[in-house]
Image (cartoon, rainbow, N blue to C red):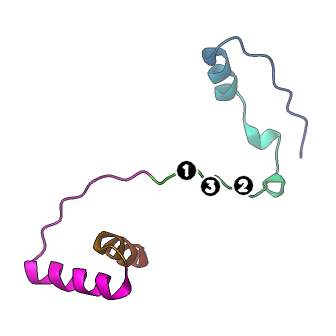
């Protein structure tokens, strides 16, 4: 830690936003100060996607998902995730 960060009392969110907009946290913290955290209750944001696939392909995906014991949309998501 470079120097102590003293947080003032904020009367409203506008004051707090102004405070955070004016400081540079790099003046107060080193990268080594970071600690891993977990947010177990957060869910990833999703957005619907319309994807046109041939019927035979959808059938094969559903068959494969059924053989793996998982929903076919979950199988599609996992395979797409492997590409990233």
Q: Is residue 25 above or below residue 48?
A: above
Depth-wise, is mark 1 or mark 2 nearer the camera?
Answer: 1
Task: Report crowding for label 1: few under 14, some 14 to 19, many 20 or more residues within 10 A (C-alpha).
Answer: few
Q: Position of residue 42 (x, y in %)?
A: 55, 50
Q: Which quadrant of the view contains residue 62?
A: bottom left
Q: Is residue 12 above or below residue 29?
A: above
**Magenta residues (range):** 45-69
**Residue 26 horizontal side relative to residue 54, left or right:** right
Q: Position of residue 51 (x, y in %)?
A: 17, 65
Task: Report crowding for label 3: few under 14, some 14 to 19, many 20 or more residues within 10 A (C-alpha).
Answer: few
> Is the Cβ of the residue at disc 1 closer than 8 Å to that at disc 2?
no
Q: Which residue is mark 3?
A: 40
Task: Report crowding for label 2: few under 14, some 14 to 19, many 20 or more residues within 10 A (C-alpha).
Answer: few
Q: Which residue is mark 2?
A: 37
**Between 7 and 45, which is closer to the camera in this rendering?**
45
Disc 3 to disc 1, C-alpha distance:
6 Å
Q: Which residue is mark 1?
A: 42
- The magenta stretch spans residue 54: yes
| Picture residue at 30% right of the left edge, 69% below the top | 73
| Picture residue at 40% right of the left edge, 75% below the top | 78
Disc 2 to disc 3, C-alpha distance:
10 Å
> Is the Cβ of the residue at disc 3 closer than 8 Å to that at disc 1?
yes
Q: Secondary structure at mark 2?
A: loop
- The magenta stretch spans residue 35: no
Answer with mark 1 or mark 2, whichever residue precedes in sequence: 2
| Picture residue at 36% right of the left edge, 78% below the top | 79
Q: Residue furthest left?
A: 55
């Amino acid at each position: 830690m470079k120097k102590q960060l003293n947080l003032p009392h904020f009367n409203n969110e506008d004051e707090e936003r102004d405070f955070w907009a004016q400081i540079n946290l790099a003046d107060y913290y080193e990268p080594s100060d970071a600690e891993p955290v977990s947010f177990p209750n957060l869910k990833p944001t999703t957005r619907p996607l319309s994807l046109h696939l041939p019927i035979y392909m959808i059938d094969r995906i559903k068959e494969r998902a059924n053989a793996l014991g998982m929903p076919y949309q979950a199988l599609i998501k996992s395979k797409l995730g492997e590409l990233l």
